[in-house]
Image: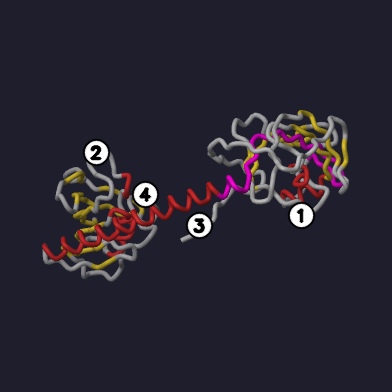
């Protein structure tokens, strides 16, 4: 299944781990702005503070990383990312309206720094999509300083997407094999021990060993319960954990305080009941395993008894 590469929202810090890319000279040489106050045809005013040796300009479908600082008309700093070791990372933005900071990004290459004079209302309502913060007057002009870090081409970004999609496909194949192996192991266990279990929505099985027919109320999400347990590897039969003698383990069901197989399995039980919870690895510890006692992709079986 083809997955889209999802980048962070505009100006939300995110990390983008990328390999170094070889720079190729553009067939069309672009002339960089001179270090004086300049104005684009749309009216964007800017000044290049540092003109680096970078030759790759932002392009549609590419990706850029940068630091920025915003100052109001009284030269007070409103927001600054300069102290953050990790730059902001975003897909190369289209300049939907002009003049705008989006238009300004397209003027910079890797290593460039520039200051842009921007209308406060347009910047916050059209770019940030939020109201003006305290300290910024409507109609005022803001100075936004941008230090460009990396500029990645569309070709490079596409190659990253292909690589990620391939990794996802391989992971799906591996998960499918584990899913089948777990299903076979669980059915073999049930057949061998002549047990009948009730499946949960995720594929765990609950085999009741002692029922509580005095109530019709099942355990539900949000209930706090106490239980004893003995945990074993389903295939090997090796015991890896159990509750202390005479003691109970307490947790809230459905709050992800325990493995998913428990959250699902206990909701098939009533208080006072005893059962086997047969859990596929995807609802247990998955490909990570746990410590040295539970190997990766190991289906588990728990004998549990819920306190009344």
Tell me the distance, in whole angstroms, between the alpha carbons under discs 2 and 3: 34 Å
Residue at 24% from the left image edge and 58% from the top image edge: 181
Q: CA distance from mark 2 to mark 4?
A: 21 Å
Q: Is residue 212 left or right of residue 192?
A: right
- What is the C-alpha distance between the residues marked 4 and 3? 30 Å
Distance Cα–Cα, label 1 vs label 4:
46 Å
At mark 2, the secondary structure is loop
Question: CB of mark 4 within 8 Å of CB of mark 3?
Answer: no
Label 3 belongs to which residue? 3
Q: Are marks 3 and 1 in contact (CB under 8 Å)?
A: no
Q: Determine which residue is flagged by label 2.
A: 292
Quarter of the rendering occupied by the C terminus: bottom left
Furthest-front residue in this view: 27
**Mark 1 = which residue?**
96
In this view, the mark in front (1 or 4): 1
| Label 3: which secondary element | loop
> At x 69% / y 43%, what residue is drawn?
58
Q: Residue at x 24, y 44 (%)?
A: 294
Mark 2 Cα-neighbour bin, 10 Å: few <14, some 14–19, many ≥20: few
Q: Position of residue 129 (x, y in %)?
A: 72, 52
């Amino acid at each position: 299944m083809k997955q889209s590469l999802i980048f962070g929202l505009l100006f939300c810090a995110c990390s983008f781990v990328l390999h170094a890319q070889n720079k190729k000279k553009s067939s069309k040489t672009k002339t960089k702005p001179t270090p004086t106050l300049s104005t684009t045809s749309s009216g964007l005013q800017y000044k290049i503070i540092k003109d680096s040796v970078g030759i790759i300009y932002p392009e549609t479908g590419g990706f850029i990383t940068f630091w920025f600082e915003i100052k109001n008309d009284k030269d007070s700093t409103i927001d600054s990312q300069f102290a953050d070791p990790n730059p902001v990372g975003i897909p190369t933005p289209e300049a939907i309206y002009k003049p705008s900071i989006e238009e300004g990004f397209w003027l910079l290459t890797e290593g460039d720094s520039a200051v842009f004079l921007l209308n406060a209302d347009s910047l916050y309502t059209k770019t940030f999509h939020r109201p003006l913060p305290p300290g910024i007057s409507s109609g005022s002009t803001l100075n936004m300083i941008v230090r460009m870090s990396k500029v990645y081409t569309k070709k490079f970004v596409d190659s990253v997407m292909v690589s990620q999609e391939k990794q996802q496909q391989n992971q799906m194949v591996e998960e499918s094999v584990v899913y089948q192996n777990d299903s076979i192991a669980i059915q073999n266990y049930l057949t061998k021990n002549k047990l009948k279990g009730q499946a949960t929505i995720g594929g765990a099985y609950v085999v009741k060993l002692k029922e509580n027919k005095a109530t019709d109320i099942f355990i539900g999400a949000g209930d706090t319960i106490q239980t004893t347990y003995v945990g074993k590897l389903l295939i090997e039969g090796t015991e890896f954990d159990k509750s202390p003698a005479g003691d109970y383990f307490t947790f809230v069901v459905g709050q992800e305080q325990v493995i998913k197989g428990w959250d699902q399995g206990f909701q098939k039980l009533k208080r006072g009941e005893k059962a086997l919870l047969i859990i596929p690895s995807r609802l247990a510890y998955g490909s990570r395993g746990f410590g040295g006692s539970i190997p990766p992709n190991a289906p588990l079986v728990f004998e549990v008894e819920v306190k009344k």
